[in-house]
Amino acid sequence: MSGEGRPRIARLRGVGRGLLLGLLVLAPSVVASEFMLDVLPHPGYTVLNDALATVFGLLFGWISIGLWISLAGALRLLLRSRSWLAGRGELRTDPGARVALVVPVFREDPMAVCARIETIYRSLEETGRLAQFDFFLLSDSNDADAWVEEEVAWAGLRARLGAQARVYYRRRRNNIKRKSGNIADFCRRWGLQYRYMVVLDADSLMAGATLGRLVDLMEQNPTVGLIQTLPAAVHQNTLFGRAQQFASRLYGPVFAAGLHFWHMSEGHYWGHNAIIRVAPFVRHCALPRLPGGGAFGGEIMSHDFVEAALMRRAGWEVWLEPGLEGSYEETPPTLLDELKRDRRWAQGNIQHARLLFARGFVPLHRAVFLNGIMSYVSSLLWLAFLVLSTIEVVLHVLIPPQYFPRAHVLFPVWPVWHPEWAAMLFWFTLAILFLPKVLAVVLTVVRGRLRLFGGLGALLLSVTLESLLSSLLAPVRMLFHTMFVVSVLAGRKTQWGPQSRGDASTGWAEALRHHIGGTLLGVLWGTAVYILSPHYFWWLVPVMAAWVVAIPLSVWLSRAGPGRAARRWGIFRTPEEIDPPALLRRYEEARAQPGLRRRTPARGFLAAIVDPGVNALHCALLKPSVAGHEGLLLSRQQLMLAAIKDGPQALSPHEKLQLLSDRDTVAALHWRVWALRASRARQWLDEGVLAQGRPLPPPFVKARR
Amino acid sequence: MVADKRTHRRVQVIPLDVHDPGDIQARVRAYLGVLGMPEGRIETLVETACAGAAHGGDAFRRLRAALVDHLAATEPGVADDPECAGLARLALWLDAPAAALESLPVSPPLIRQPMASERDLS
């Protein structure tokens, strides 16, 4: 089966929608730019005014995209329109369709990941679809401790699920191309045995019924290559996380319905909580290494958009299916965690500029690339707008107006500025920004979903607070995103680090380190503007004030205490908090399960060497050692001797990985360490463990007088 | 004190392994405790491993063989090799029959296929 036979009309429909959206965005942007020119003081500085109007027009167009998407989504939801994907053909179920559920991980909390896999496994078992699914925990962890703990958590999961459970663990030694390379490696090794794969993130959860439905939708639509679900954000406790969770839960479905409307079969792939037809993915979606260096060369960092575009380019449909419940994810718990993630995303999205004009992509996927780029470049534009407008004001203050710009004129040219027009444009822009939120609230009321958000009062209060919070955070994000864009364009690449999940919190020192620059900029810029033009100062207050309060705000929002208090007061409550689905309840139970019995405090690398059970497990999962060349054998021996002599603390992370990679060395070191005399053994074995085997001293008996 | 062959000086040699019989026994006992060996079998195994052992290395070598014997008593086809010794420890730790653990490292058969990179994206 191939997706290449898609009707021409579908292609034209895509182009038509793209053109319509483009027109809807472009026309008001031009009008807004023109209006901006009228708003600016006259006579002004032509170049400056033109630049201001252009930047404003670009920003206006950018924010109006969100409005048009939300408007279409709201209409679809209001009219209860059926999903185009689900409405085609007869629903089919083929129990013979093999599905691999793949979970790529990179230094995640393995116990939590395994609890999620267990939850999905049990849910599939309940729905009777388990026989179709195999599970793969695909590790890219490049840290010895993480590697060993993943193995232990996985073995515990296997012990709980039983020997027959098809839950596999694989760790790549070289994590080239990161997540996309990890998935590609799976496809190369095992892809031929599966018709579909469901890609999950380490924090993803999906209900068995949802997974079954996804498989059926793929069976029903043989020209579809990929279906993306809309994951609901869950499990947030920090105030920041809960506000984000609430926003994504309230506004997300409207926005996703809008994307479904505009993109149709040329939809999004977000890299997880999606089902993919394996054969076309293998055939068409391998990612190249882009030639050259700097920001635009090297490995493709944000792979998901590109994979969707490649799939579509090959003729396979890509759908965002927002109507499916039972798909969940977690969001960054703190502002700084979100910004760290954004640094990577900024680099990945800006790199897509290289692909904007690549051969064969459909226009809507080019628009997706552009949209991704604008997500970060818009911050640069916003800052540029503030800088340009400040320059304009400063020039007007410092340079006296020329009442007679030309010689031989009878009447002076009076400076004209219409503050009321500026205010009107300001309020109009705000309306465009906030209308999607209003639409989401109205829809919640109309569709009778108020109870799911704690009632009308709680919903309105939450929306108001969330809007205030997002208004405060927007300038902070803007400043960071601007720095990211500049840093990416300067060719600085980010490192691949593990993601924070759970209730991480930001300390004062960390917040100070990251936000002090913005705070100082806000104070200096604000003060200077206030001295020069107190009237203009008030226009800048929403931005400058946000920069000034960023440090305490970042710390306060990262705390779980205020987040939980907000939940008690009914603020930012989501349907999953008010009435937790069975899947989330089952996850909590799985999370509370004790792991495998551990009788030493050793964890990670140390456990793999000293704990007899963990060592045996690790050895069992390694391939048998091969007799390499003499130099390799000698270097292993040398490493082992160094480990015995100086203890684990003397080993570098790379040396630990080297030791753990060879089965004979790990086994030999295990027995050597246990046989060492006390002074050397203490470097490895806990004092309590060493004391364990010693006979107890004779009990002290008090002599009777 | 022994004479260094190169310098002919007398040097004190400290054995690398634990060598006091009481200490050897304590170490082996601790090992079996950490592994989760049932209390009733620990002393027998300590006796088997430590009787006549010159140092810790010697005792643990015997213990490894004893663990394989322990596994062989219940499972057929067990040989005195590192793999079986590992399996024996694993079975004890996970409290599961060795047969159930043999599938642990098994993954679906590898049927490799290429995933050639696109070369004409930009």
Image (tube, helix red, strand yellow):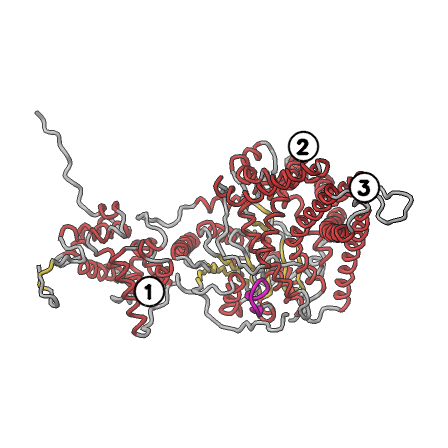
Residue B79 inside the magenta-drawn segment: no
Query: Which of the two residues, A51 or A361, is positioned nearer the viewer here?
Result: A51
In the rendered structure, which amino acid carries the disc numbered 1? Arg
Determine the residue located farthest toward the front in the rendered image: A408
Q: Mark 2 = which residue?
A: A457
> Circle 3 sits in a helix, a strand or a loop, which is it?
loop
Determine the residue located farthest toward the right in the rendered image: A410
Q: Mark 1 = which residue?
A: A663
Determine the residue located farthest toward the bottom in the rendered image: A629
Q: Which mark is residue A614?
A: none
Residue at 63%, 41% in the rendered image: A525
Circle 3: is it few (<14), some (14-19), or many (20+) Cα within 10 Å?
Answer: some
| Residue A135 screen position, x and y as percent | 49, 59
Residue at 13%, 59% in the rendered image: B13
The residues colored magenta run A288-299
Q: Which mark is residue A417?
A: 3
In the rendered structure, which amino acid carries the disc numbered 2? Gly
| Residue A585 screen position, x and y as percent | 52, 43
Query: Which of the two residues, A18 or A263, is positioned nearer the viewer here?
Result: A18
First in residue order: circle 2 vs circle 3: 3
Q: Chain of mark 1?
A: A
Q: Quadrant of the C terminus of chain A?
A: top left
Q: Nearer the viewer, mark 2 or mark 3?
A: 3
Q: Quadrant of the N terminus of chain A?
A: bottom right
Do tag 3 and tag 1 residues touch (Cβ < 8 Å)? no
Q: Is residue B29 left or right of residue A396?
A: left
Query: Which of the two residues, A397 or A496, is positioned nearer the viewer here?
Result: A397
Q: Total number of numbered labels?
A: 3
